[in-house]
Image (cartoon, rainbow, N blue to C red):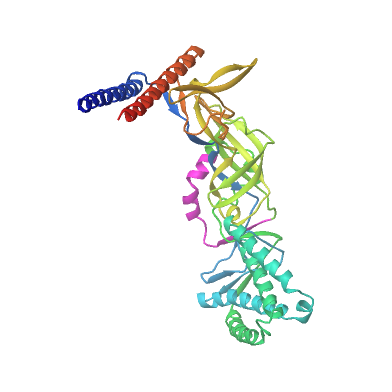
Amino acid sequence: MRSGPFNKFITKVLVSLVIGLLFIIIGGQLYRYVDDRHDTSEAVLCRINENIAFEGIVIRDETIISYSSSDIISFNYADGSKVSQGDLLAQIFATPEDASASSRLAKTEAEIEMLQRAQNPGTIDYVQPESISRRIDDNYKQLIALSNENSFGTFEEQKNNMTFVMNIFNIISGISSNYNQRIAELEDRAEWLRQRAASARDAIYASQTGYFVSCCDGYEETLGKNKALYLTRPEIEQIIAQAESRRREVPKSYIGKMFSDYSCYIVGVIDSDPRVTEDSRLKLSTDYSDTLYDVTVVSCRDEGDGKSVVVFSCDVLDSALAATRIHSMQLIFDEYNGIKVPRSAIRFQNNDGVYEKGVFVILGEDITFKKIDVIYEGGDFVLSRNTSDDDSLRLYDQILLEVVNEEDVRKAKEKSEQLRGVSGDSDESEDDSSEDK
């Protein structure tokens, strides 16, 4: 009869002890976080891109095309197109509708010629559907690539190539027996357009073989390749500042220009950089295109105040470089992605006579040395390669900024083991109490 109250007493004592141990553990944890905090920095990803931005001037030897008329001018070539001496550059029309008829006629005649070729027996007799299907896939991939690169100068040509092979596929696979009806409709349209296009009042022909651009900006006669090599910094800055006002002052009779060479010079003022030296080969991008242009440094003149006047040569021609004089540009250098590490946290540890570079990180109560693989060095930080190796610094590790020595590591280890021992004792006590119950 007495055993009942006695057991209840024992149970209360044991429960009190368990609760007390829990308070000790919680208090220890609070003490660790409040009174034993470490100065740390979390390991985070960082991207470094040291591109050099500047305003660039595109310079070529250019010849103005002039024509005095208030009528509508319809050009037959896109900017940057190569033309031969005597080619029909443009036609002059009285109305926009007549001018539109000329360009539409050219497209209609091209479509007729494409359909006739697609159903020609000499084209389709020896073609297999599988090979044509592969060509369609290849053309489609090239169109996607051109679109991503904003290379719209050759996009239309590639689209026509794809249309042509699709027309062949339709014939040999039986989807279409022929295109006679469509060709007849297009020929009727072409005849009507031909009559409208024949109303051209005048025509302009290329006076030389070269590359054509349908606009002028007022610098055609004052800037040339020889001049580019001797432009001073004030002259460059003045050209950039006055570009818009200069364009507005271009005579209306200046309708386009020609240049015989597809190469050009690009001139600008940049932040001085040891990577930009004479004869160095670099990559350059512009605000008008995603294309990366290969350029060579022709000259680099240090201005003495952290700036340099640089002349680049470029052997690429597209509509973006051809039609626009001033571009926001960037010299493209390597991009680095890694874990940002404060330089003050870097330590060296002796590992069997080999000193390894790394940092100390805190994991719970443990202080551990982790290696770093430096891929980039900044002023007060470095980037370490992002890796899944447990021995190396990993994303979100807590980097210790304070000085750590072997004694600190030993004490942290002992403290961690003591806390784990206390935790283990509490678990045993809980088991004992449950048995007593």
In the image, residue 169 sits, relative to residue 317, either above or below, namely: below
Q: Is residue 63 in the magenta section?
A: no
Q: Which residues are magenta?
A: 236-259
Front residue of this view, candidates 201 and 10 = 10
**Residue 135 image offset from top left, x and y in percent:** 70, 67
Quadrant containing the N terminus in the rendered view: top left
Outermost front residue: 1
In the picture provided, is 403 more to the left or to the right than 123? left
In the picture provided, is 123 more to the left or to the right than 185? right
In the image, residue 163 sits, relative to residue 408, either above or below, namely: below
Q: Is residue 4 visible?
A: yes
Q: Residue drawn at (70%, 66%), measured in percent from left and top? A: 134
Q: Is residue 87 visible?
A: no
Q: Residue drawn at (53%, 40%), measured in percent from left and top? A: 54
Front residue of this view, candidates 259 and 81 = 81
Number of residue marks:
0
**Residue 94 image offset from top left, x and y in percent:** 52, 76
Front residue of this view, candidates 159 and 63 = 159
**Residue 277 image offset from top left, x and y in percent:** 65, 33
